[in-house]
C-alpha cells in the first residue's frame, strides 16, 4: 500500500470507528450529545452531527458544556454524550463529573486523545487522560487504537453496551471513555466536495449495516422489582409496631420518583405519620394529598434545642433519598435516640448523622408498595395533631413576618413568595445553592405550593455554585416546558459562560427566566462564626460589585431590573409569560436581608 493510501485509510477508519461507536449508543436509546469544538475530537463530533437520531448541542466552554450535559441527563434519566478534544479540555469536565457522581446522573464522557507515541515525550496538548476522573466515574475505559480488525469485530458494540449500562446500573453516574486518534483525523481528499461525499458515503453505508446487527449485541439486564425478604419485612413491621414514627424524604432523582409521588401519601395516611419533605424530594408540589406532609420544619425545629420537653420522641424514622437541606432538621434528627431506617436505592449511604440502625436497598416506591398492603397500626392521633399544629403555627408566623416587614425591607422570602405565585404550572424550577436553596426550604409553604405542579431541581450532589446556569439550561433543553432559575449573584458570576447557548435555545423557541438575587455577595457567611473575625470583610464578605445588565447585553437576553418591592409582582408576571429568555436582576440590600432573615 502506498503511503498516501495508508493515510487515507487511517482517516476513513477514524470516522468509521467514531460513527460506529455513536450509532451503538443510539441503538441503546441515547439521543443527546454536547460538544465542545476541538481538532482531535473531529471524528466524534462529526459522527454525532451526521447521525439522524442524535441531537447535538455546541457549548465552547468545556466546564459549561459538562454541566449542560448534566442538566440534559437529569430529567430524562438517560445518559448524555459529552465530547471534547485532548489536553486540559478534559480536565475542565471535573466539577460536573463530581456533581454527576454524587447526584446519580448518567453521563458518557468521550474524550479524544493523542496516540500513545505522543505521550510522555513533550508533545503539545497531551496529558495523561486515562483515569483522570479517578473514583468519580462508574467506569474508566481506555479504547484501543483505531484499526480495521476492531471495526469488523464485536469490540465497539460491547464497549458501547458496557458503558451505557454502567452509566445506569447498579447506580447511575458518569462513565469515561478515552479514545486515541491518529492523524489524519478524516479521509484525505483533494477538495471539499470529495471529502463531504466520502463522509456521506461512509454514513450511508455503516448505519444500515449496524441496525441489522443490533439485536446480536444488545445486552439484557434484570428489571425485576426488589422486595424485602420475609425476615426483613417482619423485622421492619415489628419496629413500626413499637410506637409513633416519622418519615424523612430528601432529594430523589427522576428514576427514584417513579410511582413514589402516588404511593408516599398512601403510606403516610395508613401510618398516620408526619413526613418531612425536602423541596428536592419534589413532594411539596403537585396535586397529590399533602395532609401529612411538613414543609415548615426548618422554622419550628429551631426551637427544639431550647424546648426539648415539648417534643415527644419518635420510636422510629424512615429516610428516603439523600439527606435534607435543613440544618435545623439535621440537628433535630442527630439528637434522636429512635430506630433509624435508611432506604437506599443504589446501596450507598446517605447517613451523615451516623445513626443508621438498618439500611434496605430498594427503590422508594418498592418499599411503599410493600408496606401499604401490610396490617400496620397507625401512629396516635395526638402524635399527628402535635406535628400538624407545629406546621400550621410556623406557616402563620412566616406569612405574618413577610407582611409585617418595614416599607424599606426587601428580601429573598418575598421574592420566593411572588415567584411561586406567578410561575406557570408544570415549569422547571431550579435553585442555586448557598442561600437560595435554604430560602426555598424555608419559604415554600402549603399555601404558596398549593396546586402547583413544578419540577424542582438543584445541583445538591456536592452543593457547588459552579455550573448552575448550564445545568438549568440543560434541564430546559431536555423538555419544551417553561423554566425559572433563582440564583445568587456569586452563583451567576461563576457560570456566565454558560449563557452563550441561550441564543440557540431562544432560536428554537425555548422560554425561561433567570433571576439573579444581587445582594452583593450573598451574605451567607453573616450567619456563621466567621462573622465575628476582624478579617471577615476581606476574606468572607465576597462583594463583587457587578451590574449584570452588561451580561444580558453581551449574550442577547431580555433584561429587567427590580429595586423595589412595588415592582416585583408586575415584573415577574410579565417576564414569566414573555417570549425568549429573560434575565431578571433583583437588587437586595445585604444588611437588610440578613436582618430580615434573623
Image: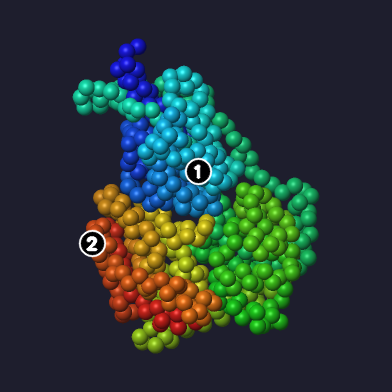
Residue extending furthest toward the front: 121
C-alpha distance separating marks 2 and 1: 37 Å
When asked about the image quadrant of residue 356, the answer is: bottom right
Q: Which of marks 2 and 1 is in front?
A: 1
Q: Where is residue 62 in the image (x, y as percent from the top left)?
A: 38, 48
Q: Position of residue 380 (x, y in %)?
A: 72, 72
Residue visible at 41% across and 81% down? 591
Residue visible at 44% across and 47% down? 91
When asked about the image quadrant of residue 405, the answer is: bottom left
Q: Position of residue 294 (x, y in %)?
A: 58, 70
| Residue identified by numbered label 2 | 553
Q: Quadrant of the N terminus?
A: top left
- Residue 103 visible, this angle: yes
Could you tell me how many numbered marks the image carries? 2
Please tell me whether mark 1 sits on a helix, a strand or a loop.
loop
| Residue identified by numbered label 1 | 132
Q: How crowded is mark 2: few (under 14 residues within 10 Å), some or many (20 or more)?
A: few
Residue visible at 46% across and 49% down? 94
- The colour scheme of the drawn protein is rainbow
Residue visible at 65% across and 72% down? 332
Looking at the picture, tell me which residue is in the foreground, 591 or 357: 591
Position above or below: 278 against 105:
below
Please tell me whether mark 2 sits on a helix, a strand or a loop.
helix
Residue extending furthest toward the top: 1
302 relative position to 209: left or right: right
Q: Where is residue 179 in the image (x, y as percent from the top left)?
A: 44, 33
Looking at the picture, tell me which residue is in the foreground, 431 or 118: 118
Of the numbered discs 2 and 1, the one sitting upstream in the chain is 1
Amino acid at each position: 500500500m502506498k503511503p498516501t493510501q495508508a493515510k487515507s485509510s487511517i482517516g476513513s477508519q477514524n470516522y468509521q470507528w467514531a460513527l460506529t461507536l455513536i450509532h451503538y449508543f443510539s441503538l441503546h436509546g441515547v439521543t443527546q450529545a454536547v460538544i465542545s469544538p476541538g481538532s482531535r475530537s473531529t471524528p466524534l463530533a462529526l459522527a454525532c452531527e451526521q447521525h439522524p437520531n442524535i441531537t447535538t448541542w455546541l457549548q465552547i466552554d468545556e466546564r459549561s458544556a459538562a454541566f449542560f450535559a448534566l442538566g440534559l441527563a437529569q430529567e430524562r434519566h438517560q445518559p448524555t454524550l459529552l465530547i471534547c478534544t485532548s489536553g486540559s479540555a478534559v480536565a475542565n469536565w471535573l466539577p460536573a463529573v463530581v456533581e454527576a457522581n454524587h447526584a446519580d446522573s448518567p453521563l458518557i464522557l468521550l474524550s479524544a486523545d493523542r496516540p500513545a507515541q505522543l505521550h510522555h515525550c513533550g508533545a503539545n496538548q497531551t496529558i495523561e487522560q486515562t483515569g483522570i476522573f479517578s473514583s468519580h466515574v462508574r467506569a474508566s475505559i481506555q479504547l484501543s487504537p483505531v484499526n480495521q480488525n476492531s471495526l469488523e469485530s464485536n469490540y465497539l458494540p460491547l464497549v458501547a453496551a458496557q458503558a451505557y449500562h454502567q452509566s445506569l446500573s447498579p447506580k447511575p453516574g458518569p462513565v469515561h471513555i478515552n479514545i486515541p486518534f491518529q492523524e489524519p483525523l478524516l479521509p484525505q481528499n483533494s477538495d471539499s466536495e470529495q471529502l463531504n461525499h466520502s463522509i456521506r458515503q461512509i454514513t450511508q453505508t455503516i448505519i444500515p449495516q449496524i441496525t441489522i446487527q443490533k439485536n446480536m449485541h444488545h445486552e439484557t439486564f434484570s428489571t425485576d422489582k426488589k422486595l424485602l425478604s420475609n425476615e426483613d419485612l417482619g423485622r421492619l413491621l415489628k419496629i413500626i409496631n413499637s410506637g409513633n414514627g416519622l418519615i424523612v424524604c430528601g432529594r430523589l432523582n427522576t428514576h427514584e420518583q417513579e410511582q413514589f409521588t402516588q404511593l408516599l401519601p398512601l403510606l403516610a395516611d395508613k401510618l398516620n405519620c408526619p413526613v418531612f419533605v425536602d423541596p428536592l424530594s419534589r413532594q411539596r408540589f403537585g396535586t397529590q394529598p399533602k395532609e401529612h406532609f411538613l414543609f415548615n420544619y426548618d422554622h419550628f425545629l429551631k426551637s427544639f434545642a431550647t424546648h426539648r420537653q415539648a417534643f415527644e420522641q419518635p420510636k422510629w424514622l424512615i429516610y428516603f433519598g439523600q439527606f435534607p437541606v435543613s440544618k435545623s432538621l439535621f440537628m433535630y434528627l442527630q439528637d434522636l435516640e429512635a430506630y433509624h431506617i435508611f432506604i437506599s436505592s443504589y446501596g450507598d449511604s446517605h447517613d451523615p448523622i451516623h445513626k443508621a440502625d438498618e439500611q434496605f436497598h430498594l427503590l422508594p416506591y418498592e418499599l411503599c408498595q410493600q408496606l401499604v398492603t401490610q396490617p400496620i397500626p397507625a401512629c396516635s392521633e395526638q402524635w399527628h395533631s402535635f406535628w400538624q399544629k407545629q406546621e400550621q403555627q410556623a406557616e402563620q408566623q412566616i406569612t405574618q413576618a413577610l407582611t409585617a416587614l418595614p416599607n424599606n425591607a426587601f428580601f429573598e422570602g418575598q421574592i420566593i413568595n411572588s415567584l411561586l405565585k406567578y410561575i406557570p404550572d408544570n415549569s422547571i424550577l431550579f435553585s442555586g445553592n448557598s442561600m437560595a436553596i435554604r430560602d426555598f426550604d424555608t419559604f415554600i409553604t402549603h399555601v404558596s405550593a398549593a396546586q402547583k405542579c413544578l419540577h424542582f431541581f438543584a445541583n445538591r450532589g456536592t452543593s457547588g455554585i459552579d455550573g448552575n446556569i448550564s445545568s438549568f439550561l440543560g434541564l430546559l433543553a431536555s423538555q419544551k416546558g417553561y423554566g425559572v432559575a433563582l440564583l445568587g449573584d456569586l452563583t451567576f458570576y461563576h457560570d456566565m459562560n454558560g449563557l452563550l447557548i441561550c441564543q440557540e435555545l431562544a432560536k428554537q423557541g425555548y422560554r425561561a427566566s433567570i433571576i439573579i438575587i444581587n445582594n452583593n455577595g450573598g451574605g451567607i457567611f453573616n450567619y456563621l462564626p466567621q462573622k465575628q473575625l476582624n478579617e471577615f470583610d476581606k476574606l468572607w464578605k465576597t462583594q463583587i460589585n457587578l451590574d449584570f445588565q452588561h451580561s444580558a447585553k453581551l449574550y442577547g437576553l431580555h433584561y429587567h431590573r427590580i429595586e423595589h418591592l412595588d415592582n416585583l409582582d408586575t415584573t415577574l408576571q410579565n417576564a414569566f409569560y414573555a417570549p425568549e429568555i429573560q434575565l431578571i436582576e433583583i437588587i437586595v440590600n445585604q444588611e437588610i436581608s440578613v436582618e430580615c432573615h434573623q
